[in-house]
Image: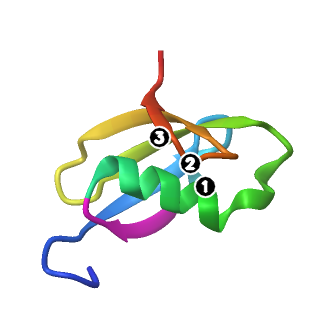
């Protein structure tokens, strides 16, 4: 259940992993969900950057983001 009134549930997974590695994250935005996933699962590897797929659980809408592991900066996948 979302923690705050404006939070939504997102399913987030690293792009290079299968969907069974997805985590449900409660955040306000797609970007915040992507960063929260990377922060929680920092031990995914030693990469400087990781790509994640974020899906809004309610609508099914998806976005892909590249996350800089060091800074937490998020940018759309290219």
Identify the residue position indicated by label 3 in the image. 53
Q: In the rendering, which numbered label is found on residue 72? A: 2
| Crowdedness near tag 2: few (<14), some (14–19) or many (≥20) residues, C-alpha within 10 Å | some
Q: Residue at x 56, y 48 (%)?
A: 72
CA separation, marks 1 and 2? 8 Å
Q: SS class of the residue under badge 1?
A: helix
Magenta stretch, main secondary structure, is strand
Q: Residue 13, position in %: x, y?
A: 55, 49
At horizontal 73% and vertical 59% (from top left) the residue drawn is: 42
Which residue occupies 69% across, 46% down? 70
* Disc 3 from disc 2: Cα separation: 15 Å
Residue furthest toward the front?
71
Mark 3 nearby-residue class (10 Å; few <14, some 14–19, many ≥20): many
Kind of element beneath mark 3: strand
Marks 1 & 2, CB-CB < 8 Å contact: yes
Left/right placement of residue 23 relative to residue 41 reads left
Name the front one of labels 3 and 1: 1
Q: Nearer the viewer, mark 3 or mark 2?
A: 2
Residue 22's place in the image compared with 4, above or below, is above
Q: Which residues are magenta?
A: 22-28
Determine whether the residue tagged by mark 2 lies in a helix, strand or loop: loop
Give left or right: position of 51 versus 7: right
């Amino acid at each position: 259940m979302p923690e705050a009134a404006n939070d939504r549930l997102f399913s987030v997974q690293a792009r290079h992993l299968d969907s069974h590695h997805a985590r449900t994250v409660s955040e306000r935005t797609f970007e915040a969900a992507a960063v929260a996933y990377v922060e929680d699962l920092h031990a995914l590897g030693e990469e400087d950057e990781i790509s994640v797929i974020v899906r809004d659980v309610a609508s099914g809408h998806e976005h892909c983001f590249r996350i800089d592991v060091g800074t937490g900066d998020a940018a759309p996948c290219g």
